[in-house]
């Protein structure tokens, strides 16, 4: 039996208009956060990424996932000591989020 890991065994499907928010606490060092995402349809999908911390800092950007693509996309960079909320809003399409990755 393989141990389950909630960051690498997500398989979270989002449909157009749906969103998910992750809260990241106790950040020990600045790191890049990425998500392994699979486009589940035959047209491009659009994700709106919003990151905000308790100090009021807010960052937003859009990610376009090409038709049928499966790859890793950067969600943003979080700083040491801050608590961050990362919201992924699917504006168009149908995707599956397979993994959240923290890179130093």
Image (cartoon, rainbow, N blue to C red):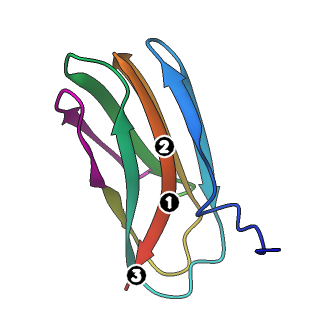
| Mark number, residue 30 | 3
Q: Which residues are magenta?
A: 56-73
Badge 1 local density, few (<14 within 10 Å), some, or many (20+)?
Answer: many
Residue at image coords 19%, 26%: 67
**Foreground tag (1 vs 3):** 1
Real-space Cα separation, disc 2 to disc 1, in angstroms: 8 Å
Residue at image coords 19%, 22%: 44
Residue at image coords 39%, 54%: 36
Q: Position of residue 29 (x, y in %)?
A: 47, 87
Q: Position of residue 21 (x, y in %)?
A: 59, 40
Q: Relative to 2, does residue 16 appear above or below in the rendering?
A: above
Q: Position of residue 101 (x, y in %)?
A: 45, 67
Report which residue position mark 1 lands on: 100
- Are the residues flagged by discs 2 and 1 in contact, CB closer than 8 Å? yes
Q: Quadrant of the N terminus?
A: bottom right
Real-space Cα separation, disc 2 to disc 3, in angstroms: 23 Å
Badge 2 local density, few (<14 within 10 Å), some, or many (20+)?
Answer: many
SS type, badge 1? strand
Q: Is residue 23 magenta?
A: no
Q: Is residue 58 magenta?
A: yes
Report which residue position mark 2 lands on: 97
SS type, badge 3? loop
- Sequence-wise, the earlier of marks 1 and 3 is 3
Magenta stretch, overall SS: strand
């Amino acid at each position: 039996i393989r141990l389950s890991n909630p960051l690498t065994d997500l398989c979270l499907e989002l449909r157009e208009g749906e969103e998910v928010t992750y809260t990241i606490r106790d950040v020990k060092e600045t790191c890049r956060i990425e998500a392994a995402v699979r486009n589940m349809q035959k047209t491009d999908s659009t994700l709106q990424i919003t990151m905000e911390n308790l100090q009021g800092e807010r960052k937003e950007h859009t990610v376009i996932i090409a038709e049928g693509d499966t790859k890793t996309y950067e969600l943003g960079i979080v700083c040491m000591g801050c608590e961050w909320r990362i919201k992924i809003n699917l504006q168009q399409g149908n995707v599956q989020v397979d993994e959240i990755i923290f890179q130093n």
